[in-house]
């Protein structure tokens, strides 16, 4: 039965003063993290419970759930307050990050409860990316585990400066000070690998509440603050975002009519006043800020985190993705930089593979040019590596399709952070933190050449092109490519054929057949094809090239219309029956590994320029179809 | 300018504006789900701010189950007229024709047909690639788990076990044709934030949120208002006039009132601070069973 609520006048008064702003509370965003079963969800349940943030109907639901799913006998299972997904309740684990809200008299809190399982590390990183403080749970019985180090490393990388070691389940080790001391010492031994500015260690029992909101009588030896006291008082060195140089990522160009052209965005750092001169980081074009427009009226000044719309005093080229900055404090602008990477996809990170990079409001093609190292979680030491697997952390050099403006992540969490997106699955596959730009790009000036591609091709009476034959081993790619080249040659065209087997004997002799090497193999071939196209040739490339991403990379290297993807679509059964080199037999016997179609995938082209199938004729007829296409497209004359 | 906002409300406001602009910059055909409630009112107010001096470049969509409070419908039409926005109203006509109602068909079936199915019909018909919703993470356990940009398959399903990582404010807006994103600009707001913001910004709300004498019956401990003549009264039930208000608004037979004297937004904020039950307690559809919100969301519910 809903009880009538009656309010005492003084309650209304205090509520009014609270609502009208003279009781400002600061906001702390924090995460709970650490290894699986260390009690993260239970701790948050405890914080909500102790802060009286739970409503009666929620407690009733919790009691009901505890009887059904609970893991602590007849007691209320506080973890069920946050483990809100069906699968989480059934398995008794946390899968995804949950955001909960509570307040004490001194502060408001948003807490992200992050999963401990290694499998779900990306969800932990999701929660950590917006947090100011990390509560790192450690099971007193188990001490520091690799997953504890992984979470500490990610928290530190993502710029969290305050860590609390919550040494939990202290009741299960008899409230023993020696256990607490040993864990703190073990953490401090690793501390050189982290960049935390404060570390507080608190022995707690999340289940029973010791040292969470009240000091525990069972641990008179502990003289520090309770967890709540610490969360309420930790100094959030306002990171001085407003004192830094202006960073204004243009998010959206607002043009309701011809008379208004405004640049909508949120200040990532600094402040802006009307009359200030700003430049577009990418081009260096300058203008003055004319108005700072908001729905509530124009402002004279705006600061970091304000969402506003700027108008400029003259027309310059500005679009979404541009960064407006002060002329005398510009960010780096480069197409190469070094960054830390947290890999979050099942498919490994492959150097050379093209991804989409979203940085600020800009999305651009990018690839890892060199993986410097991977961080080994048992020792926190860098190890040489060729790829990154799910949940690995690495350090790598990147290149982007065009120069971009950025700051170091340490200087600015907005202009120094990026995500990588797979071009085909659209999944977010990695989070990146830029450390520094690489000067290489600016020091190698491209040689300006007077004889260019068009003149070279013109001398040959043709347009340059790449005919990219892809398909399974034994599909007939090389046979058809050979026939096409003969026909072109006979009609006086200038060609060159790059063949998979031949290239592997020379240029790519050092590469094997792992996914990483396959990517590098195709990258080198694509770059070679690009040079030959620049020479004015018609290049025939015959490669299994099983991954869409690398075929896209080859396509992106040349101009629009120069790339002709020819899918030789022969069913696996047919190719395997042909088996011209006896390779399928060996693959089936397990003598060759990573063989496309058998134990390595072939990703079919979605929109090839040409699809050739044995049903449409023999190799000769299929080669004629290719020639007809080239004539049709004006690549060779009629 | 009105009196300056408290810092944390300002931060929430700026975050919501950023999210809305990100949608408009990246999607070709967005729509805003407008449910007429307090959260929708705040969301709409933020949209007016985000695109000023332009008008929000998307229509509002209301899924009308035909069982909303009458005051909600008049408020809806008045709001669209006042702000000069396109309003699309959709009802599942098949459901209406077969007389689906909350009395005979159970809250769960009724919600599935008149809300979830209706929503999917409207989203499909409009070909929308992004849809704003006013849900908040503090409302319910499965919502606490949801991303700000929440991916939906071609059939509008949500896969809570496989959500895209969402770091910083770098929202991944990439989708294949037919897929869509549900966007929740109010994810990080609490119920109290909503009321404080309504108070500070003087945002119009449906009067049902404020206390008044209304005809209610008491059913399983819940106060249900007899909003029109379709209300089925059980034998012996006689609607009584009580001073009540609503903390959340939905279909009137499925939305419980609370007894309250809070007749102004200031009173509501004060009452909030002493509340001992959650707002969703008044939502009958949440109580079918534990995890029922997650199930509805997987099926396409907002």
Image (cartoon, helix red, strand yellow):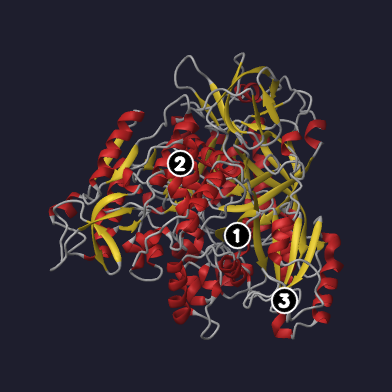
Residue at image x 28%, y 61%? B223
Q: Chain of mark 2?
A: B
Which residue position is annotated with label 3?
A216
Are callouts 2 and 3 both on one chain? no
Q: Is residue A337 visible?
A: yes
Query: Toward which corner of the image does residue B295 lie, by quadrant?
Result: bottom left
Which mark lies nearer to you, 2 or 1? 2
User: Which residue is the site of mark 1?
Assistant: A112
Residue B143 locus on image (x, y percent): 46, 58
Along the viewing direction, whichever of A420 and B222 lies nearer the viewer: B222
For numbered disc 3, what is the local secondary structure? loop
Q: In the rendered image, which quarter is residue A328 located in?
A: top right
Say which residue label 2 marks: B198
The residue sitting at 34% across, 44% down in the picture is: B36
Mark 3 chain: A
Between the C-alphas of marks 1 and 3, the distance is 25 Å
Neighbours of disc 3 within 10 Å: few (<14), some (14-19), many (20+): some
Separation (CA) of disc 2 from disc 1: 26 Å
């Amino acid at each position: 039965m809903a009880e009538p609520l009656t309010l005492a006048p003084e309650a209304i008064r205090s509520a009014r003063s609270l609502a009208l702003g003279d009781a400002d509370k600061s906001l702390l965003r924090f995460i709970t993290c650490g290894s699986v079963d260390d009690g993260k969800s239970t701790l948050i349940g405890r914080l909500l419970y102790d802060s009286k943030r739970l409503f009666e109907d929620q407690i009733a639901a919790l009691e009901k759930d505890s009887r059904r799913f609970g893991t602590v006998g007849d007691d209320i299972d506080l973890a069920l307050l946050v483990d809100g997904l069906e699968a989480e309740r059934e398995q008794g684990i946390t899968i995804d990050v949950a955001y909960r809200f509570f307040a004490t008299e001194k502060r408001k809190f948003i807490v992200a409860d992050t999963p401990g399982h290694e499998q779900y590390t990306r969800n932990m990183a999701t929660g950590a990316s917006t947090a100011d403080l990390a509560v790192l749970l450690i099971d007193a019985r188990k001490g520091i585990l690799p997953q504890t180090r992984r979470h500490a490393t990610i928290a530190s990388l993502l710029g969290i400066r305050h860590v609390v070691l919550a040494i939990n389940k202290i009741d299960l080790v008899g409230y023993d000070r020696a256990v607490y001391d040993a864990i703190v010492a073990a953490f401090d031994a690793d501390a050189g690998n982290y960049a935390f500015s404060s570390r507080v260690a608190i022995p707690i029992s999340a289940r029973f509440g010791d040292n969470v909101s009240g000091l525990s009588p069972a641990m008179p030896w502990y003289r520090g603050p309770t967890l709540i006291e610490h969360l309420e008082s930790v100094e959030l060195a306002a990171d001085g975002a407003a004192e830094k140089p202006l960073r204004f990522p243009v998010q959206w160009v607002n043009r309701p009519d011809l008379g208004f052209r405004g640049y909508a965005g949120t200040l990532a750092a600094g402040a802006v006043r009307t009359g200030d001169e700003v430049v577009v980081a990418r081009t260096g074009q300058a203008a003055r800020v004319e108005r700072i427009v908001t729905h509530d009226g124009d402002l004279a000044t705006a600061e970091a985190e304000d969402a506003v719309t700027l108008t400029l005093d003259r027309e310059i080229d500005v679009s979404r993705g541009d960064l407006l900055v002060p002329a005398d404090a510009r960010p780096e602008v480069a197409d190469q930089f070094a960054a830390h990477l947290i890999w979050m996809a099942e498919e490994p990170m492959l150097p050379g593979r093209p991804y989409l990079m979203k940085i600020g409001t800009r999305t651009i093609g990018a690839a890892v040019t060199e993986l410097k190292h991977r961080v080994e979680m048992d020792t926190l030491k860098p190890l040489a590596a060729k790829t990154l697997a799910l949940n690995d952390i690495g350090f790598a050099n990147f290149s982007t399709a065009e120069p971009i403006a950025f700051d170091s992540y340490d200087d600015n969490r907005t202009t120094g952070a990026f995500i990588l997106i797979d071009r085909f699955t659209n999944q977010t596959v990695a989070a990146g933190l830029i450390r520094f730009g690489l000067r290489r790009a600016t020091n190698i000036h491209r040689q300006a050449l007077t004889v260019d591609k068009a003149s070279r091709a013109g001398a040959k009476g043709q347009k340059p092109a790449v005919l990219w034959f892809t398909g399974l081993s034994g599909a007939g790619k090389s046979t058809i490519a050979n026939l096409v080249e003969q026909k072109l040659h006979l009609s006086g065209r200038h060609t060159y054929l790059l063949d998979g087997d031949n290239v592997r004997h020379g240029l790519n002799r050092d590469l094997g057949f792992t996914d990483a090497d396959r990517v590098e193999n195709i990258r080198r071939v694509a770059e070679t094809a690009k040079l030959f196209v620049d020479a004015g040739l018609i290049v025939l490339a015959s490669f299994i090239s099983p991954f869409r991403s690398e075929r896209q990379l080859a396509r992106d290297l040349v101009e629009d219309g120069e790339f002709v993807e020819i899918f030789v679509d022969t069913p696996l059964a047919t190719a395997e029956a042909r088996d011209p080199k006896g390779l399928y037999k060996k693959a089936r016997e397990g003598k060759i590994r990573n063989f496309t179609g058998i134990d390595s995938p072939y990703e079919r082209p979605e929109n090839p320029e040409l699809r050739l199938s044995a049903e449409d004729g023999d190799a000769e007829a299929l080669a004629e179809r290719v020639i007809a296409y080239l004539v049709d497209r004006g690549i060779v004359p009629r | 300018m009105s009196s300056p906002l408290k810092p944390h409300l300002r931060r929430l406001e700026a975050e919501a504006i950023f999210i809305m602009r990100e949608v408009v910059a990246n999607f070709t055909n967005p729509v805003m789900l407008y449910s007429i409630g307090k959260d929708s009112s705040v969301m709409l107010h933020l949209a007016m701010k985000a695109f000023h001096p332009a008008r929000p470049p998307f229509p509002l969509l209301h899924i009308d189950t035909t069982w909303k409070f009458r005051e909600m419908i008049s408020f809806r039409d008045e709001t669209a007229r006042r702000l000069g926005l396109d309003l699309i109203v959709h009802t599942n006509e098949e459901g209406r024709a077969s007389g689906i109602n909350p009395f005979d068909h159970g809250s769960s079936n009724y919600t599935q047909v008149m809300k979830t199915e209706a929503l999917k019909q409207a989203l499909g018909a409009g070909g929308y690639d992004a849809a704003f919703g006013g849900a908040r993470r503090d409302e319910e356990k499965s919502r606490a788990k949801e991303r700000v940009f929440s991916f939906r398959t071609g059939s509008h399903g949500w896969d809570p076990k496989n959500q895209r990582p969402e770091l910083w404010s770098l929202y991944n807006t990439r989708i294949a044709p037919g897929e869509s994103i549900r966007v929740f600009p109010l994810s990080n707001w609490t119920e109290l934030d909503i009321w404080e913001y309504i108070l500070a910004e003087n945002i119009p709300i449906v009067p049902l949120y404020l206390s008044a004498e209304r005809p209610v019956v008491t059913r399983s401990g819940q106060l249900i208002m007899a909003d029109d003549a379709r209300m089925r009264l059980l034998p012996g039930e006689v609607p009584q006039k009580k001073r009540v208000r609503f903390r959340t608004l939905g279909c009137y037979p499925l939305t419980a009132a609370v007894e309250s004297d809070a007749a102004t937004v200031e009173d509501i904020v004060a009452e909030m601070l002493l509340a001992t039950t959650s707002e969703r307690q008044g939502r009958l559809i949440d109580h079918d069973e534990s995890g029922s919100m997650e199930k509805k969301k997987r099926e396409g519910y907002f």
